[in-house]
Image (cartoon, coloured by chain):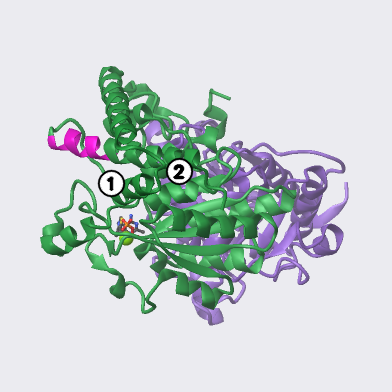
Chain colours: A green, B purple
Amino acid sequence: MGLSNEILLDMYWTMLLARRTDERAWVLHRQGKIAFHISGIGQEAAQVGAAFALQRGQDWISPYYRDLALMLAVGLTPLEFMLSVMGKKGEPSSGARQMPSHWGLRRANVLSHSAPVATQTLHASGLGLAIKLKGDKHVVLTTIGEGSTSQGEWYEAVNWAAIHKLPVIFMVENNSYAISVPQDKQMAVPSAADKACGLGLPGISVDGTDIVAVYSAMQIAVERARSGEGATVIEARAYRLTPHSSDDDDRAYRSREEVETYKKSDPIPLTQRLLLSKKIATQAQLDEMEKRAQTEIEQAVADATAAPYPSPEEALHPVYAEEVTHA
Amino acid sequence: MPEMTLIDAIRQGMDEELAHDPNVFIVGEDVGVRGGVFRATRGLFDKYGPQRVMDSPLAEASIIGVGIGAALYGMRPICEIQFADFIHPAFNQIINEAAKMCYRSNGDWTVPMVIRAPYGGGIGGGLYHSQSLEAFFTHTPGLKVVVPSNPADAKGLLKSAVRDPNPVLFFEPKKGYRLIKGEVPEGEYLVPIGKADVSREGTDVSVFAYGMMLYYTLQAAQKLAAEDISVEVVDLRTLYPVDRESILTSVRKTGKALVVYEDNLTGGYGAEIAAIIAEQAFTDLDAPVRRLAGPDVPAVPFSHPLQDWFMLNPDKIAAAIRDLASY
Ligand SMILES: Cc1ncc(C[n+]2csc(CCOP(=O)(O)OP(=O)(O)O)c2C)c(N)n1
Ligand SMILES: [Mg+2]
């Protein structure tokens, strides 16, 4: 599988940085310092496991809003994230035009996505088609929530990729809810991966809190994609440990007991235990990483707080490509 | 200069662009072996092969969404929607994705693509093979909307659209595909997007039209010349962004303005032209701005007498011009 201790530590570091950055955003929201946050807490192993199976920076990604850990894995910095939650100038995905967590990072081959769910999956198939037409060897990862696989655009995207054997991996981050609606009101099959069968491509369901399991499934899919065998659907099962967003109150639709139960499968302590039990890291090393994350994030919050807002005139452009001033 | 039909000129434009740029490809329903249901792509599959003239699954959102993804990878897709009436499943991809990509990514991602769609009634197509839908898209910054009225313009504008770095909607008056003939310059030429054209000079009344209605308006103007009414006919050609200067120049000369469009009257594209004139040329007007358009029923009915009742024609246009001239 090729996961050295060093890579496993790097994966854990990325998960941890994502978790602490995410938690810091919740605090900023409670302090009234930011207007909105949508969280990836509980899905870090799925995202980091997927990202590390790619050739990061070379392969392409068409993500969705919960992918903070995925974005950090491909080079987004905590400062850039803090700029985006504060709507500050220099925010790299949209120049602070979009709400936070509407990703996009040209330098890392991450497409810009919108809010209407599932639209990004068709773009992934288009990328896959272009890669194939040009004879390149890159693969495309696109992510989505399980509820959003109810959209026609998701089926259309997977269908295209299956017909043309496109180098695309459709990862469904199944966190059990779509806002308040549970999985069994979204689909009649037990796993979103089962949908692949009807479209003629393999579907794999993995424990999305197990970083090694996700990485292994992704490796198979990446290998298939890169060798011209085509697309794969991967469902990574996890649980959304937070409300849908800072505007949601999840007490209206799920019990505290349920949430507490799932905290036992929180991927951060699970991964810590893995590192300790396999003697990949010592407790002292993990403590050190905690400190490093905290320092980096506090610096990011301070720098983002001091950063200027965009000036109103910036809102006028660029509507058309001719108005783009940077290269 | 050789004379050719509108559809032959469109095909020649695509042929030249396929030859000119290896990134150009055509994608749509039945565009391959069949050469399109209107034969717009006839012969191109044999000449360029299945990778460059590609039959899509029967799913319009995917034609546009996959086109967007391919464009983001550096391709230049020409997406064909078989009839404009079937563009609605792709509305989300056009309005929320293609049109907003440049702005929402602060210029990092742009979408060079052409969406060709045959539009308009008078061909016995009933409610769902007759619609004029430009008004939905001329409301959308980020898109360019082009409607040619003659073969020379159709070819030159289509070639410009393919080379344009933005998404361009190219609505083709299908009734005119074989009815409208005209001379087409030999050799390489482009017609710029964003410039209207004075198709016929006159002094009494300015008529603003595009597509099939422009063709009919020229016939009406010809007829009225015998009655000593001098009609200036302005072909808008690009509906968005619109060439305000040409509109105002003409209306300042004649003092009377009629806007003719095939779509339903209310909220139709011509309302915007009327508003531009009312706002910026009020003191030059000798009569109220008039609109002549389709009736406010859902779409063009099938049975001939019903269709004829809905559709404008040279006689109806001549009557409206006569009426305005005598104001
Ligand atoms: C087309 C569309 N409809 C509705 C919404 C509002 N909305 C945002 S997220 C969401 C739930 C998505 O659930 P899921 O796909 O499971 O992803 P998760 O948020 O659980 O990660 C809804 C209904 C939207 N963004 N887009
Ligand atoms: Mg969900």
Measuring from the top left, give residue A4's x and y in whole percent: 52, 43
- Looking at the rendered structure, the secondary structure element under dot 1 is loop
Whole-percent x, y for residue B252 in the image = 50, 31
Q: Is residue B269 visible?
A: no
Residue where numbered disc 1 is placed: A39
Task: Examine the structure image and report whether residue A26 is included in the region drawn in magenta.
Answer: yes
Q: Earlier in the sequence, mark 2 or mark 1?
A: 2
- Graded by Cα atoms within 10 Å as few (under 14), some (14 to 19) or many (20 or more), the crowding at tag 1 reads many
Residue B74, image x, y percentages: 66, 42
Q: Is residue B255 above or below residue B132?
A: above
SS under mark 2? helix
Q: Is residue B305 within the magenta segment? A: no
Name the side, left or right, on which B245 lies relative to B149. Answer: left
Q: Where on the picture, by quarter, is residue B100?
A: top left
Task: Confirm or reject: label 2 Cβ below 8 Å from ligand 1.
Answer: no
Give me the chain letter of mark 2: A
Tag 1: amino acid: Ser
Provide the major secondary structure of the magenta segment.
helix
- State left or right for residue A37 relative to residue A217: left
Query: Which image quadrant shows ligand 1?
Result: bottom left
> Disc 2 to disc 1, how far (Cα)?
23 Å
Asked whether residue A230 appears in the rendered view, the answer is: yes
Q: Magenta segment, which residues?
A: A22-30
| For discs 2 and 1, the disc positioned in front in the rendered view | 2
Which residue is at the far bottom? B303
Left or right: A124 in relation to B149? left
The residue at the point 35 percent across, 56 percent down is: A209
The residue at which mark 2 appears reads as: A8
